Image (cartoon, grey):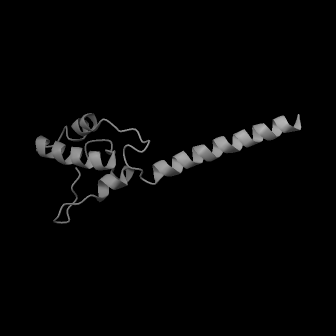
Amino acid sequence: MASLRCQLVLLLIIVCLTTYELHVHAADGAKVGEGVVKIDCDGRCKGRCSKSSRTKLCLRACNSCCSRCNCVPPGTAGNHHLCPCYASITTRGGRLKCP
């Protein structure tokens, strides 16, 4: 009976550690292809750029940022705090690249 309890406790510890490692790995900004599910950049960027006056330019920039970060903030503008990688990409001139 004691060995069964020890086995169950050990199994629980292994599951907890594995779950923790997966969350830490995802939070560290793991690159796409390393176990992180790739989002639908085209669909998300169409929504993001739907109200833009220069839709094609917005879509090109958004898709470029999305492919690097695997993230697009919700809504048509703002909310950059929800996707820090997306918000940190700049042009050569130092302006924010991602719409």
Give the percent coordinates (x, y) of residue 29: 41, 52
Give the percent coordinates (x, y) of residue 74: 33, 42
Report the residue at 60% width, 44% height from top.
18
Seen in the picture, residue 47 relative to 65 is either above or below; the reply is above
Query: Which quadrant would residue 39 be assigned to in this image?
Result: top left
Which image quadrant: the N terminus? top right
Residue 52 horizontal side relative to residue 81, left or right: left
Give the percent coordinates (x, y) of residue 10: 74, 42
Query: Which quadrant would residue 59 be assigned to in this image?
Result: top left
Extreme-right residue of the structure: 1
**Number of numbered discs visible in the structure rendering:** 0
Residue 33 horizontal side relative to residue 4, left or right: left
Report the residue at 34% width, 54% height from top.
85
Residue 78 horizontal side relative to residue 14, left or right: left
Seen in the picture, residue 61 relative to 42 is either above or below; the reply is below
Give the percent coordinates (x, y) of residue 48: 24, 41
